[in-house]
Amino acid sequence: MSKKNVCVLFGGRSVEHEISMITAIQYIEAMDRELYNVIPVYIAHSGKWYMGDKLLNKQFYRKLPSCLSEVDEVTLLPDPTVQGLTVVRSAASGLLSRFKKPEVVPVDVYVPAFHGTYGEDGCIQGLLELADAAYASCDVLSSAVAMNKYICKVIAGHHDVPVLPSRLVTRDEFRANVSETRTKVLNSEGLGNYPLFIKPVHLGSSIGIGKATSDAELDAALAEVFKYDDTAIVEPCVKDIMEINISVMDSEDLTASVTEIPVGTDGVLSYEDKYLKEGAGKKGKLQGAQESQGMASLSRSIDPEHLSDDIKKVVTGYALKLAKILGASGVGRFDFIVNNSDGSIYFNELNPIPGSFAFYLWEKSKPPVIYPQLINKMIDRALERKANKAQYEKDTGFKALFN
């Protein structure tokens, strides 16, 4: 059996750029090299795509952006006949002649390992669809819906999955009148009392999140969000909170992992909790690298014995229900909130490409799915989805145009 060419895409035009790199590095290290030829593709902040084995060395990135001249520049054309990456500039020979047919590197499956805008939100998935490529993630619609926390909650609530009350605030309305915006927030149903929780609508990795206990803190938290996003979502802050996460995989059928309870320093998981706490770095397989383990390093209780079976069952049921409704594919992570004061359970958000692909949840599942197996399932399913789409009729001929 010939090896499949698997292109792992990472980086991107997002403030979660660095976390994407960590997720991709972990994924590449876990891939079975007997089954796959790995093609790492780094998308710089500029939006340009780069390919080459040097991208596998963490130390390479210390010399950004000058070091990018040492790897090939490539692109993905929205052309179904290409079926691979087109080389724009060869590191060995420089710019390709316009009289020379560009080299195409064949790719069987793409694995988007992005977090945040322009990668996790349906943008890259749209390009992959235009290129008729197999890819291991949610599709365009489910990615876009998942990355809009407000719309995702509206859909969940419509299908009887409980969510907290919330209100959207746009950058334009905030800048036009800060005081009036604050008043509208505090007059919204369920938001009349502090503390309140504020976060960007379109981002993850706990970037831009804040908790407000006063008018001044609410104004400051909204201003912080608008450094990263054009829309904020404001919700009541559950005081006696417990967060529960669970992963869902689209393989032969929708399957749920075990649950976890992540541990934050102040009741809310911060960027520092997730990625910068002591112990987050472990010796990796990259050349002399000492890289962060991303979400896999977070303090957490996986399949906690003290969590009641009833809560685990409810959370699992909600996650599988939402995955089906949203058409989620690949490996996603559904996050929930429990109010310990009264036992209420609320859906919080869906991460269509979770940090570390949530592999740590599957390793503890029954039966366990180790990371290389999880990767195999993701890739196999991506190829199945492409084969299924190929069965649909796409050309009905010219009927109306010449009628």
Image (spheres, rainbow, N blue to C red):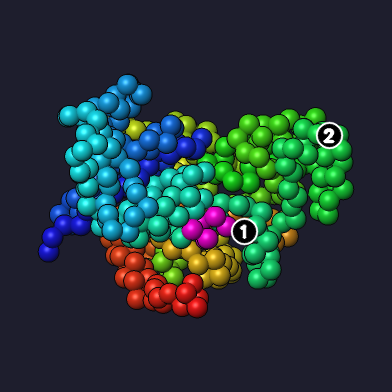
Please give the residue where the numbered disc 2 appears in the rendered image.
177
Q: Amino acid at mark 1?
A: Cys
| Local secondary structure at mark 1 | helix
Q: Measured from the top left, where is residue 21 in percent x and y?
A: 38, 38
Q: Is residue 268 left or right of residue 72?
A: right
Q: Measured from the top left, where is residue 89 in percent x and y?
A: 26, 34
Residue at 22%, 34% in the rendered image: 96
Range shown magenta: 140-145
Residue at 27%, 26% in the rendered image: 69
Q: Residue 212: which quarter of the image?
A: top right
Q: Is residue 58 left or right of residue 364?
A: left
User: Are circles 2 and 1 on residues that touch, CB within 8 Å?
Assistant: no
Q: Nearer the viewer, residue 244 or 181?
A: 181
Please give the residue where the numbered disc 1 appears in the rendered image.
152
Q: Measured from the top left, where is residue 198 in percent x and y?
A: 69, 41
Residue at 62%, 39% in the rendered image: 229
- Main SS of the magenta part reads helix
In what quadrant of the picture does the N terminus appear? Answer: bottom left
Tell me, yes or no, whether the highlighted magenta stretch contains residue 36: no
Q: Amino acid at mark 2?
A: Asn
First in residue order: circle 2 vs circle 1? 1
Compared with residue 338, is residue 116 higher up or lower down, i.e. above or below?
A: above
Residue at 57%, 37% in the rendered image: 207
